[in-house]
Image (tube, helix red, strand yellow):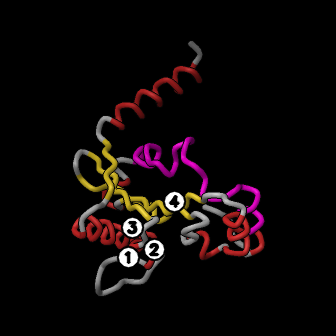
Amino acid sequence: MNSVASLALAAIERGYELLNHVDYRLAETPAEREQIYRLRYRAYLQEGAIAPRADDRVTDRFDDLPNTWIFGIYYDGALASSIRISVATPEMPISPAVDAFSDVLQPELAKGKIIVDPTRFVADPARARNISALILASPACAPTTPRSIAASSSRRCWRRRGCRPA
């Protein structure tokens, strides 16, 4: 086996081993959600995305919508990461992406399309350095995760606003 194939195989094996330690859980209780809101705060504060706040939490109006699910990603039983998934449909056309890019996405919803909008992906800054492979095991980075919006539409939209998608 050549060295590239050996490296690829080793990476896959590490990924499988990592998945033995990772558990994805829907945040169903107020306590689980609160833990995630505080994780968001620590992650955004560490990255300089927000200023310090007295309540030490990040939440918004999308967190409580009926078309939104918040997942905790646990590593060896401890919360290490989180992601929020909103599903906008013609019947429930609300999500962070639809709010931000309504000129592009509302017409798509009017055509009957469904928009899966993953947002608020965060990793615990204290644990992320030790478990850097956690990002590769997250649903946001998995190649089978549905994209939130059509690639061509989103690129036009981001270009028009002078920024790039993450």
- Quadrant the N terminus occupies: top right
Tell me the element at label 1.
loop
**Discs 3/1, front:** 1
Distance between the Cα atoms at labels 1 and 2? 12 Å
Q: Position of residue 90 (x, y in %)?
A: 61, 66
Foreground pick, 19 / 69: 69
Q: Which residue is mark 2?
A: 62
Label located before the other in sequence (1 or 4): 1
What label sits on residue 118 in the rendered view?
4
Q: Amino acid at mark 1?
A: Val
Foreground pick, 117 / 159: 117
Circles 1 and 2 in contact, beta carbons < 8 Å: no
Q: How dense is the environment of label 2, judged by Cα within 10 Å: few (below 14), some, or many (20 and up)?
A: some
Distance between the Cα atoms at labels 4 and 2? 12 Å
Judge from the rendering whether residue 56 lies leftward or rightward of residue 115; answer left or right: left
Circles 3 and 2 in contact, beta carbons < 8 Å: no
Q: Which residue is mark 3?
A: 43
What label sits on residue 58 in the rendered view?
1
**Discs 1/4, front:** 4
Q: Which residues are magenta?
A: 132-158
Foreground pick, 14 / 155: 155
As for residue 32 lying within the magenta part, the answer is: no
Q: Determine which quarter of the picture holds residue 159.
A: bottom right
Tell me the element at label 4.
strand
Q: Is residue 51 above or below residue 15?
A: below
Distance between the Cα atoms at labels 1 and 4? 16 Å
Image point 36% across, 57% down: which residue? Answer: 71
Tell me the element at label 3.
helix
Q: Is residue 86 above or below residue 78?
A: below
Q: Position of residue 16 (x, y in %)?
A: 39, 31
Judge from the rendering whether residue 152 lies leftward or rightward of residue 75; answer left or right: right
Q: Amino acid at mark 4?
A: Pro
